[in-house]
Image: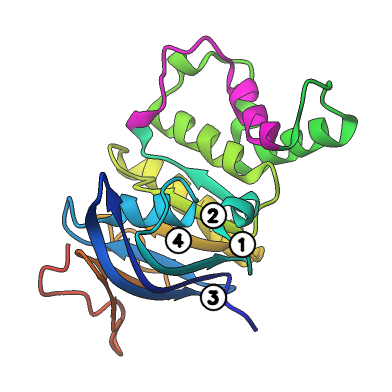
Amino acid sequence: MEPLVTLQDVSAGYDGSAILHNVNLELREGDFMAVVGPNGGGKTTLFRTILGLIEPMGGDIRVTGTTPSKGCVNIGYVPQFGSFDRKYPALAEEVVTMGLRQSQTFNPFSRKDKEAVRKAMEYTGVDAFARKRIGDLSGGQMQRTLLARALVSGPRILLLDEPTASLDPEMRSGVYNILRKASSDGITVMMITHDLKGAEDCVNRIVKVDRTVTEIDRGPHGMGCGGGIL
């Protein structure tokens, strides 16, 4: 089976300066991959390259068998929590609906679209506070809302950038429960995290990103991730 995402000798960065060098990586269907590494090592750059937001400086990248700009329609993306403007005057339900806009023009949302929003909110528990303004949501509620927005279009791949950062233990547990459910329902997950202990029973692969990408052996007794890989 062809991998969902393939990077071959990829270098990427900004303004002519490479942050990632000679990256070789495959994300296979059914993976739940944790992406770890030091700040500034290129984790978010890796995601932006997969999403087609930046062009690689060298090498080749395929997303669901095509270019990232085309393959990204099969990806649901949850950015870092702090990157979403909580002052934006929107309800939780409206934020979830934004996940459908890539396939919309100016036509009203169809009954099928509205049903997809309802199911995504139910799946993530957002239905309990769908009519609350996002400025009034707790951190855990906001993260559930962003998860629902990423899931509403029925993606094959879910990319998450530090989805449990700044959340208390109960909120983190709720996010992981949703991700376990998504994984068991056939969604391939790739997640930047500094919380390997919390994600221990979720992930089946770990890669370290520090200018390049190296896969970490989980070892025979669990993660096997000592040695300061973060």
Determine the secondary structure under disc 4.
strand
Q: Residue furthest right?
A: 111
The amino acid pointed to by label 2 is: Leu
Task: Determine the CA span between mark 1 and mark 3.
Answer: 11 Å
**Of the image marks 1 and 3, the number of the one nearer the N terminus:** 3
Q: Quadrant of residue 109?
A: top right
Q: Which residue is mark 1?
A: 187
Mark number displayed over residue 190:
4
Query: In the rendered image of this protein, does residue 136 appear above or below residue 174?
Result: above
Q: Are marks 1 and 2 in contact (CB under 8 Å)?
A: yes
Q: Quadrant of the C terminus?
A: bottom left
**Three-letter code, disc 1:** Ile
Query: Is residue 201 one of those drawn in magenta?
Result: no
Verify CB contact (< 8 Å) between mark 4 and mark 1.
Answer: no
Residues at circles 4 and 3 in contact by the CB criterion of under 8 Å: no
In the rendered view, would you say 78 is above or below 225? above
- On screen, 190 above or below 147? below
Q: Marks 2 and 3, Cα distance to the nearest angstrom?
A: 12 Å
Alpha carbon distance from label 4 to label 2: 6 Å
Quadrant into which the N terminus falls: bottom right
Q: Which residue is mark 2?
A: 158
Amino acid tagged 3 = Arg
Marks 4 and 2 close (CB-CB < 8 Å)? yes
For disc 3, the marked residue is 28
In the rendered structure, which amino acid carries the disc numbered 4? Answer: Met
Horizontal and vertical percent position of residue 70 = 63, 53
Image coordinates for residue 120, horizontal then vertical, percent: 68, 40
Q: Residue 62 or 101: which is nearer the viewer?
A: 62
Q: Which residues are magenta?
A: 82-102
Image quadrant assignment for residue 213: bottom left
